Amino acid sequence: MNLKQQRFCDEYLKDGNGTRAYMTAYPDSSEESARRLASQLLTNVDVKQYIEEKNREIHNSKICDVEEIRQLLSEIARGLETGKSESIVVENVGGGISKARKVTKKPDEKDRLKALELLGKANSLFTDKMDLKAQVDIQVDIDGAEDED
């Protein structure tokens, strides 16, 4: 794959618009020819493989794995700095004038308890059902039945 084809692929990955990507990689082309040639270029084996590989990389970098989720929940539960969130607060500064500002806050008790609950569920600390096994002899007496003894 040459540099222009790679540029086409990188542009195509931004929004999936082949015509725009082709015109960026090959600026001297008309819109009509860009549409036709982009479609043709997308059937190229090397181009398809490059786009699929980059899509996998993008997908993998955006998805949290189990360990990352547990780590983040643990940090929130402990009230650590990484669990901070931003909020916008509007304050009255006097004279009928208000001012908005961003406030960064650590996780409050509600957030920390929710994180602990989710961690507990993930680690099966809380069970709603209990599995008990025991051997029990059962005798049933029916009123009015005669004894066979």
Image (spheres, rainbow, N blue to C red):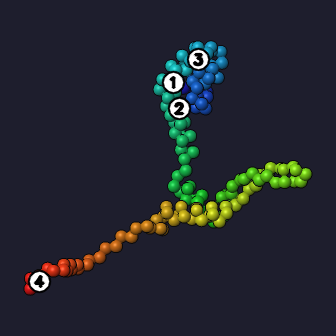
Percent of width and height locating residue 47: 52, 27
The image quarter in which residue 26 lies: top right
Q: Earlier in the sequence, mark 3 or mark 1?
A: 3
What residue lies at 58% left-to-right and 17% top-to-bottom?
34
CB atoms of marks 2 and 1 within 8 Å: yes
Percent of width and height locating residue 11: 61, 28
In the image, farthest residue toward the left: 149
4 vs 3, front mark: 4
**Local crowd size for mark 2, using a 10 Å CA cut-off: few (<14), some (14–19), many (≥20):** some
Q: Which residue is mark 2?
A: 51
Residue 25 vertical placement versus 98 (above, below): above
Quote the CA–CA distance across marks 4 and 1.
88 Å
**Local crowd size for mark 3, using a 10 Å CA cut-off: few (<14), some (14–19), many (≥20):** many
Q: Which residue is mark 1?
A: 42
Residue 56 vertical placement versus 15 (above, below): below
Kind of element beneath mark 1:
loop
Tell me the quarter of the image containing the N terminus: top right
CB atoms of marks 4 and 2 within 8 Å: no
Quote the CA–CA distance across marks 3 and 1.
12 Å
What residue lies at 48% left-to-right and 23% top-to-bottom?
43
Percent of width and height locating residue 15: 60, 30
What residue lies at 55% left-to-right and 59% top-to-bottom?
70
Q: Nearer the viewer, residue 88 or 77?
A: 88
Q: Which residue is mark 3?
A: 34
Quote the CA–CA distance across marks 2 and 1.
9 Å
4 vs 1, front mark: 4
Quote the CA–CA distance across marks 4 and 2.
83 Å
4 vs 2, front mark: 4
